[in-house]
Image (cartoon, rainbow, N blue to C red):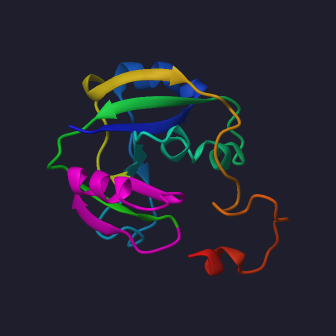
Amino acid sequence: MALFIHLASEKQTASIRRTGIRAQRVRKGAYGDFDRVVFAMPVTNNFYVSHQWLRELKRSGQRTTFGVYFRIPDEQDVMVGHYNQAHLQMTASEAVGLIFNLPSAEGYEILIPRRIDADEIHSIKSLPQVLGWRYYPTAKGRKPCGCRIREAYG
C-alpha cells in the first residue's frame, strides 16, 4: 500500500481526523466516469514533488496548508495525469510507479474516486508554506499573463 498526501486547509484538519477526506465534486466528464474525487500525490523521495501543489492551492485563499498522509489499497482504481492534459485510469500501484519513473513529475496529480476514511489516514502534519510552484510548473522567473503559455508547457 503506497503512501499518498492530500493538501488541506488547517480549518479542515479536525473534521478530517474525525470523518476522513471528503471527495470533491468535479465537472461531469472532466475525469472519465468520476464525478467526485480526492486529489492526491504519492509520497516520493523528492519532498518538493510530493508537496508541489501547496503554493498553487494557496493562491485560492488558503492560509495555512497541512499535509494529510493516507494509504489506499494498491488495487484501487484512480486517474493519473498532468493537470492540463487527459488523465489515464489505472490502479493506485501503477499510478505511483508512473509518477516515480517520470523524469519530471511537476504538474501531475492522482485522483481517487471516493472518500478517504478516517482509519486510512496515517498522519496529519504541518508543512513549510513556501513550497511548490504558482501558475504552472515552469513559471519561475516569468511574469504571469493571460496568454496560452500554459498550453505551450503541456
Q: Is residue 95 magenta?
A: yes
Position of residue 34 measured from the top left corner of the image (x, y, whole percent): 31, 62
Which segment did they paint magenta? 84-110
In the rendered image of this protein, does residue 98 appear above or below residue 6?
A: below
Looking at this view, name the residue that lies furthest to the right: 143
Q: Is residue 65 left or right of residue 110?
A: right
Percent across and percent down for residue 27 are 46, 66
Residue at position x 31%, y 41% in the image: 115
Q: Is residue 134 above or below residue 12?
A: below
Residue sitting at 37 percent across and 69 percent down?
A: 87
Residue 80 within the segment the image draws in magenta: no
Q: Is residue 36 visible?
A: no
Across and down, in percent, residue 120 comes to 26, 28
| Marker count (numbered) | 0
Q: Quadrant of residue 116?
A: top left
Residue at (47, 59) in percent of width and height: 108
Write the residue at 37% across / 56% down: 99
Point out the image quarter for the C terminus. bottom right
The answer to whether 82 appears left or right of 111 in the picture is right
Instruction: Examine the rendering and report whether any part of residue 69 can be seen.
Output: yes
Q: Residue 132: x percent and y percent? A: 64, 46
